[in-house]
Image: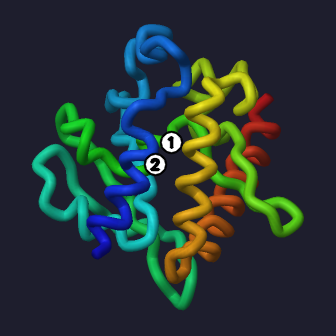
């Protein structure tokens, strides 16, 4: 059942991308490369069950909590992925859900600004409309999962912390 639930979410994002062309050309696919230290992607609630058996990466616990004492997991790639099996965070990159005044909206992920020219220079509304719409549809489905709201609140807190850190570095 979980595979089917995430399958529907993944399908929403299979044919849409942030730009009408390959945005990886702009940055030489920086989001898929390890630089000085491995960069991981947060795994949405229950998604780790789908990623436990893939052969292109591994899961680790983070120090972030959500829901009833659940620990968020991070997926680290060890080689190029099978795109049809990549985590939801990769599929929605460089966007992240953000709760403001009780409503979910999409923002450019502040953690992405270091590597992604889109995250540094554009607003979500400047990305492909179908991409933004489908990411929002996906987040509405995530919200319906047990602890989905709490997970989005955790991502909001992380985004706020990164934004504060980015302000201090300017």
**Residue positioned 24% across, 47% down in the render:** 85
**Numbered circle sitting on residue 89:** 2
Q: Quadrant of the N terminus?
A: bottom left
Q: Is residue 99 above or below residue 106?
A: below
Quick one: 128 or 161, which is closer to the camera? 128
Residue that carries the numbered disc 1 in the rendered image:
92
Side of 138 relative to 52 (left or right): right
**Residue positioned 71% across, 32% down in the render:** 124
Q: Position of residue 151 (x, y in %)?
A: 57, 70
Q: Is residue 53 above or below residue 45?
A: above
- Tag 1's secondary structure? helix
Q: Position of residue 81 (x, y in %)?
A: 22, 37
Q: CA distance from mark 1 to mark 2?
A: 5 Å
Task: Locate residue 103: give its quadrant.
Answer: bottom right
Quick one: 165 or 19, which is closer to the camera? 19
> Crowding near pointer 2: few (<14 within 10 Å), some, many (20+)?
some
Side of 32 relative to 84 (left or right): right
Q: Quadrant of the C terminus?
A: top right
Side of 137 relative to 108 (left or right): left
Q: Position of residue 88 (x, y in %)?
A: 42, 51
**Residue positioned 41% across, 60% down in the render:** 43
Render colour scheme: rainbow
Quick one: 14 or 75, which is closer to the camera? 14
Q: Position of residue 55 (x, y in %)?
A: 11, 49
Task: Locate residue 102: give its quadrant.
Answer: bottom right
Furthest residue to the bottom?
68
Pointer 1 and pointer 2: residues touching (CB < 8 Å)?
yes
Side of 66 relative to 49 (left or right): right
**Residue positioned 63% across, 67% down in the render:** 154
């Amino acid at each position: 059942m979980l595979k089917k639930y995430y399958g529907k979410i993944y399908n929403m994002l299979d044919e849409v991308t942030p730009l009408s062309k390959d945005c990886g050309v702009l940055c030489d696919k920086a989001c898929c490369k390890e630089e000085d230290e491995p960069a991981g992607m947060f795994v949405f609630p229950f998604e780790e069950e789908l990623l436990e058996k893939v052969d292109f990466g591994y899961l680790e616990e983070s120090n972030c909590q959500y829901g009833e004492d659940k620990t968020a997991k991070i997926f680290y790639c060890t080689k190029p992925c099978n795109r049809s099996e990549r985590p939801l965070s990769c599929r929605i990159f460089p966007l992240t859900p953000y709760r403001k005044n009780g409503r979910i909206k999409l923002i450019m992920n502040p953690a992405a600004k270091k590597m992604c020219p889109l995250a540094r220079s554009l607003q979500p509304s400047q990305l492909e409309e179908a991409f933004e719409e489908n990411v929002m549809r996906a987040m509405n489905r995530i919200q319906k999962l047990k602890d989905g709201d709490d997970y989005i609140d955790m991502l909001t807190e992380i985004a706020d912390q990164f934004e504060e850190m980015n302000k201090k570095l300017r």
